[in-house]
Amino acid sequence: MESDQKMKLYLAMLSLQFCFAGFHIVSRTALNMGVSKVVFPVYRNIIALLLLSPFAYFLEKKKRPPLTFGLLVQLFFLALCGITANQGFYLLGLYYASPTFASAIQNSVPAITFAMAAALRLEQVNILKRDGVAKVLGTITSVGGATIITLYKGPPLLHYQATQPLGSPDEEAAFFSTSTKMGHWTLGCLYLLGNCFAWSAWLVLQGPVLRKYPARLSLTSITCFFGVIQFLAIAAFVERETDHWKIQSGGELLIILYAGIVASGISFSLQTWCIDKGGPLFVAVFQPVQTVLVAIMASLILGDQLYSGGMIGAILIMMGLYAVLWGKSKEKSNENEEVKGSTLTRPLINEESQGRDPVVVVEC
């Protein structure tokens, strides 16, 4: 890869991480403003659908296969995992936790995806080789890190808040208040783990569907459409008050536009380009950069606190992430070497045909 192309790819990846990091911040800001956790994704996916549909229609007109009923059912369940459960669990988790730990837990998605793919026998695991051991240990380490974030908050790292003096009249009330907050924090982390599992399931299920329907933009547009329908069905039971659907201020409008245009439309296109130029492994390696950016932005903009338990868990998740990615890279390298060696050394012999001598062909 030429140096100019590498530089463009690095800049694109950093821009992508800024886009996603910004989405964590604006989502938390929207929740702080009181924007509904159901209305927000409805508007976001409507904007993304309006943005992607024209490109999907015109750019993939010739290669888009016909839709069958069975394929529509698969796309419906793909939307249920990748949009409805994914975004719903994320917003619920973000409401109780923080953007920093939401981003940190999401680093476990590659490991969870590998575990799901291995369970469904879509991913081969050979524990007798180093790459297989690295993938298994990396998965265990990532899940362990996510568990620590969920169960252990730990003391704050930046500053310590004043506490009630021992023996004060409000000591018991302060204790129960702290216990309630810790319960909410654990609940938020559990929701975020649900977000990771839904995201991983979407990645695993997407492979078989893409083989049947290789038009990526069209697939994403149809998935967004089903996501809107599913969220509207949920809203019919949860958000019946019309006031919750009204955009109350210019700030809310900007946040919704950012979520739909930047976090969905631009980020999707940019990520697709980066995967095409650098490969999925290269894109996944940059995921921890997002966590660092979110931690800085959340601290400066939202005044979020960093806790030791979250940092320990985040470090373990990142170590597990890189172990899984190293194992995948090593496995791919070994496969390429085996294929190259077999094609260079194995002669293809055509038997005598029509009285001619055998012909020996060596593949190069």
Image (cartoon, rainbow, N blue to C red):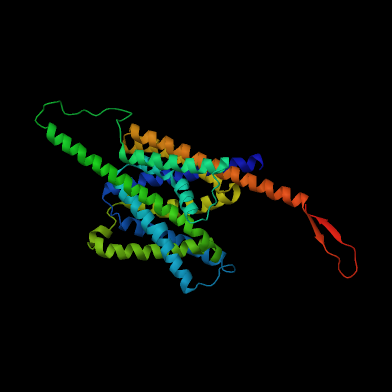
Q: What residue appears at the point 40 percent right and 65 percent down from the top-left corner?
A: 226
To which quarter of the image does residue 159 belong? Answer: top left
Nearer-the-camera pick, 187 or 271: 187
Residue 184 locus on image (x, y percent): 25, 44
To which quarter of the image does residue 64 belong? Answer: bottom right
As drawn, 38 above or below 302: below
| Residue, far left | 169
From this viewpoint, is residue 25 visible? yes
Q: What residue appears at the point 44 percent right and 48 percent down from the top-left corner?
A: 112
Q: What residue appears at the point 36 percent right and 66 percent down from the top-left corner?
A: 229
Image quadrant holding the N terminus, namely: top right
Residue 48 locus on image (x, y percent): 43, 58
Nearer-the-camera pick, 258 or 303: 303
Labels in figure, total: 0
**Relative to residue 257, is residue 331 drawn left or right?**
right
**Relative to residue 177, is residue 112 drawn left or right?**
right
As drawn, 179 above or below 348: above
**Relative to residue 190, is residue 54 drawn left or right?**
right
Q: What residue appears at the point 40 percent right and 54 percent down from the top-left corner?
A: 198
From this viewpoint, is residue 250 visible? no
| Residue, far front | 128
Residue 167 locus on image (x, y percent): 11, 26
| Residue, far top | 166
Residue 143 locus on image (x, y percent): 41, 43
**Relative to residue 210, is residue 354 drawn left or right?**
right
Nearer-the-camera pick, 261 or 277: 277
As drawn, 147 above or below 223: above
